[in-house]
Image (cartoon, rainbow, N blue to C red):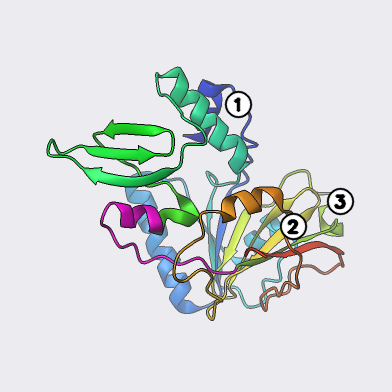
Amino acid sequence: MYREIEKVSGQDIGLHMTGGLSVAATQDRWTFLRTEWARHRVIGLDSELLGPRELRDLCPIMDTADVIGALYDPNEGHLDPSGATHAFAKAARSLGAEIERNAAVTQLERTSRGTWRVITNVGEIEAEHVVNAAGLWAREVGQMGGIALPLVPVEHHYLITGDLPEFDSLEREIPVTVDLDNEIYLRQERRGVLLGVYEKNVTLWAERGTPWAWSDRAARSSQRSSAGHPGGRSWSSGTARCKRAATGRPR
């Protein structure tokens, strides 16, 4: 889909089709990945089950001592979310869609005709369907339509490293890698990596409602640096400077 959107819109979305790895370090996870692989074969997806040695060939910075195996999908990757958003917008406009910027939805009302009356700060729109793509504010928009979505924002930590020596002779990007047993994920960022951590005891934010004004403040603010704490797996035999560590929450 993303290749098609890029072609139709003419907008560069920074698409990197690196492939994706889902790693298993426990027998339960390995059983789950084998089940997924069998399902992929039925629906025609071209994925593979890999052993530790094959995994190391694809991701040379990964310590595979406790790894049982991994599921590899060559049709995964990452892209620039800003570029992708503009690509969707351009493609939609080319097919006749109208986009109204800086129009805040303040209320949704169901009409007697079964349509929706969408009230904004710049006027009203009547729509047959309303798609809730409000992201951080999806909970609040859902409430406008009488739907209680069980969502709450949480802090999320990630860090970006400097150059890694393992990448010096590598002529391709490493796959996007997810290791749920060790609660981490990573992808290549230039000659280093972006590494994020999943946390079980997360810190909740804005439990009673996401402030509408925060989007304006976030657009003007740079991200706040803080200490990142990667998971328990060893990822590189060399050393790399941490260029940036960030917490995904507002000031």
Across and down, in percent, residue 171 comes to: 78, 43
Question: Is 144 left, or right, of 69 in this rendering?
Answer: left
N-terminal of the pair, mark 1 or mark 2, is: 1
Q: Which mark is residue 193?
A: 2
Classify mark 3: helix, strand or loop. loop
Q: Residue at x 74, y 54 (%)?
A: 222
Across and down, in percent, residue 214 comes to: 58, 56
Q: Looking at this view, is 137 or 65 the one in front? A: 137
Asked whether residue 142 is drawn in magenta, I would say: yes
Asked which quadrant contains residue 25, the reply is bottom right
Q: Looking at this view, is 74 or 239 the one in front? A: 239
- The residue under label 3 is 168
Disc 1 vs disc 2: Cβ atoms closer than 8 Å? no
- Residues shaded magenta: 140-155
N-terminal of the pair, mark 3 or mark 1, is: 1
Q: Residue at x 31, y 53 (%)?
A: 144
Q: Which mark is residue 128?
A: none
